[in-house]
Amino acid sequence: MKNKKIFYGWFIILGAFLLIYLDGLLLYSFGVLLPSIEIKYNLSNTFVASIFSVRCLVFAFSMIIFGKLTDKYKPEKVIFFGGMISALGMFFTAYSDSTLALFLNYGVLTGLGDGAFYVPAIVIAQRWFNKKRDFAVGLATTGVPISGLTVNPLSAFILENSNLETTLIILSAITFIFLFGAFLMKESPEELGLEPYGGPFSQEENDVENSWTSSAAIKTLSFNLLYIQLVLGMLSFLIVVTFQYDLALDRGFDILTSSLAPASIAAGSFFGRIVTGYLSDYISRNKILFSVFMGQALSIFIILNTNSITGFILFGICFGFCYAGWIPIFPSKLKDFFGKANSGVIYGIFGTGFSISAIFGPPLGGYLIDKFGTYDYGLYFCIIVCLIAAFLSLIINKPIKNN
């Protein structure tokens, strides 16, 4: 009998997981670091949240750059070089002695390097899977919730027993170690003389002539509706994930207990990615999008009506499951709509929706907290945008290409 070798695509998913873990590290750790940054630099909620927004603005341009580089060059060195920028950014942040240095090191450097993590990992992972594509992408993106489950308690523990500077240095070291996952990322199955999992892609999918250019794709109604959905969904997510830890502290919980609040979002997120990635082979992706956006909106009523850590955890699991439920769906819809020849740059442009949300979301949440002295108005806003995103799912169709 022949010994069956493990399909190399699963090593691609492992590498993608490690890289996306680092994207999650940057995303989730900020909420835990936020109170310490406020205290050290004597800054307001709004001002500190704007540092995160600067990082995400830089991240928007970085995603396009690294998406384009992924379409043209072998990914290993490109990803590793970009990731090193983020690692150095966090390391330098530990030694920032002014708010300007804080903006440059955390806002610019980490944002610039972050573009090398998520978009290249997803684009390359899709090239290796014809069947079970959403499931494979969902597995890779569990790096984000696993990061939240581990980085949040770790960061809180280090902060409680040491200081902000030590926490940032350790996070920088973790980034450097996990970054070696970049060298698992081979450009395509053909590079190793293999076929994608489930067999070759159809001639239509492989045909460059049937693929859309990025400039044509972004002009379609379908792309723009998906983009708006991403922006709205991320607005809700970023406001919640940035201030949920702070809200738990405000409700009287200690540092370690409060860290369970955002960690519970990560736990729900882990299962949401896998479940919807699996179900997309059997259920319309539009129906999945409608269901998870609706669930994301309704789950917020839990946190509006609880003062117990159990309620915070229940909310986090439900909200995280629904938020993560649309994560593996978008890349596949884009690939189905626009082909794979320019998938890197198209997904990079699409990913800027995250940055648009981050530019406005956390500062808006911080402003509402500072002005009204309550977290409720930000949460009401999150409900409204998720409901809008849910109903957009009902009108998204595949665009027709005019040759």
Image (tube, helix red, strand yellow):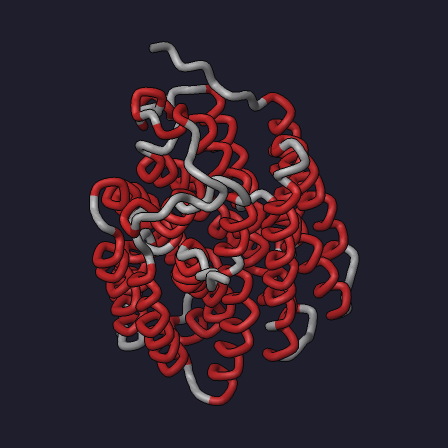
Which quadrant is home to the C terminus? top left
Which of 284 and 327 lies nearest the eye of the viewer? 284
User: Between 230 and 254, which is closer to the camera in this rendering?
Assistant: 230
Question: Which residue is located at x 30 percent, y 48 percent?
Answer: 193
For the point 27% across and 57% down, which residue is it? 79
For the point 65% across and 65% down, the residue is 264
Left or right: 230 as drawn, with respect to 85: right
Left or right relative to 279: residue 353: left
Residue 15 horizontal/vertical position (percent): 39, 61
| Location of residue 169 (image quadrant) | bottom left
Q: Position of residue 104 (x, y in %)?
A: 25, 61
Whether residue 162 is visible to the viewer of this picture, yes or no, is: yes
Left or right, 175 with respect to 281, comes to left
Occupied quadrant, residue 78: bottom left
All told, the count of numbered labels is 0
Q: What residue lies at 56% left-to-right and 48% top-to-bottom? A: 135
Residue 117, image quadrant? bottom left
Q: Is residue 36 above or below residue 221?
A: below
Residue at the extreme bottom: 161
Image location (x, y in percent) of residue 43: 42, 66
Task: Look at the picture and state if 274 lies above or below 252.
Answer: above
Given residues 250 and 22, the one toward you in this image is 22
Asked if residue 360 can be seen in this view, the reply is: no
- Residue occupying the far front of the picture: 1
Residue furthest top as drawn = 402
x, y percentage for residue 361? 50, 47
